[in-house]
Image (tube, grey):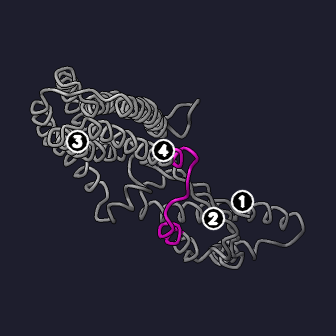
Amino acid sequence: MAAGSKKAVTAAIIGNGSLTVAKMIAFMMTGSAAMMSEGLHSFADTLNQVLLMIGIKRSTREADPRFPFGYGAERAVWALMSAVGIFFLGCGVTVYHGVHNLLHPSQLEGLGVAIGVLVVSFVIEAGVLFVAVRAVRRDAEGRPFFRYLWKESDPTAAAVVAEDTAACLGVLIALAGIGLTKWTGNPRWDAAASIAIGLLLGAIAVWLILRSGTLLVGPSVPADKRRRIREIVAAHPAVEKIAMLRTRVMDTETFRVAADLEFDGDSLAASLEDELEAAYPTIHNYDEFRRFAARYADLVVEQLGDEIDSIEAAIQEEFPRAKFLDIEAE
């Protein structure tokens, strides 16, 4: 998953960095508010994707005594910072500039250059989006794409998909605004396009903030996985009752399962039948019985540990991402 996300983010940085330069040159040549919005959009995307790359690199560090569960959640931290950057830099500045040009319109020049830059931009943005979507689809492994993107995907990959979807839509909005301005001679169409791009960025930013915030709080694993984990535990012959079962997504690579179980004493005793039968003839007095009881208590504890190990192995066999298991006897 990390490899796919890294590839998507790298492609996005290269693509958006190049487009920032092209769009700002076109803005300086035309004075178009929509083109400035698109330039700011690509600039914000580039900075944000640099943040995502930092998150990817930091999240791969090994667990240590300070962070015993690892650093995987750093992806969500940096994705959240990226989303906040989109909201303030992308949405705020773009809407402000669009409103200013709407209230104080000025004649635009060289709109043909702007249209040409936007057409090229759309091709590049679509290519970057294709790389990101392909990476997420590969990670989804057949699961419904949009459900996976919202609930389970790597937050860095989700951010790239969302940002590049907004970038493609933003280019189309800018094309519409500049095209209408060129056709009608009214620059307010260009300003309106700038405002629309800003609002689009705001909507994407809010979605990404909610997505990253959910991962940081620590949601449960999807209901179908919880149900299957419960079935695996309940099917174990030594388990009499599941008193409590909780799960938590730690990061995109791991989740945690905690369970309090009531074990069947008869089942544990049956598994120790041979030891009981061998010890019984040797008990002739209380001291021998006390030594037997102490030994049998040790055997029960060892057997209980073996049963818990067996349950954990069964869970991890079906769910390799369940790397942190806390199974306890109630």
Mark 2 or mark 3, whichever is nearer to me? 3
Q: Is residue 147 above or below residue 85?
A: below
User: Where is mark 4, residue-wise?
Assistant: 212
Residue 73 position in % (x across, y down) = 49, 40
- The span from disc 4 to disc 1 (Cα, nearest Å) is 47 Å
Q: Amino acid at mark 1?
A: Asp
Dot 4 crowding, Cα within 10 Å, few <14, some 14–19, many 20+: many
Element type at mark 3 = helix
- The span from disc 4 to disc 2 (Cα, nearest Å) is 25 Å
Dot 1 crowding, Cα within 10 Å, few <14, some 14–19, many 20+: few
First along the sequence among labels 2 and 3:
3
User: Where is mark 3, residue-wise?
Assistant: 171
User: Where is mark 2, residue-wise?
Assistant: 245
- The span from disc 2 to disc 1 (Cα, nearest Å) is 27 Å
Mark 2 or mark 1, whichever is nearer to me? 2
- Please give the range of residues in magenta: 213-229
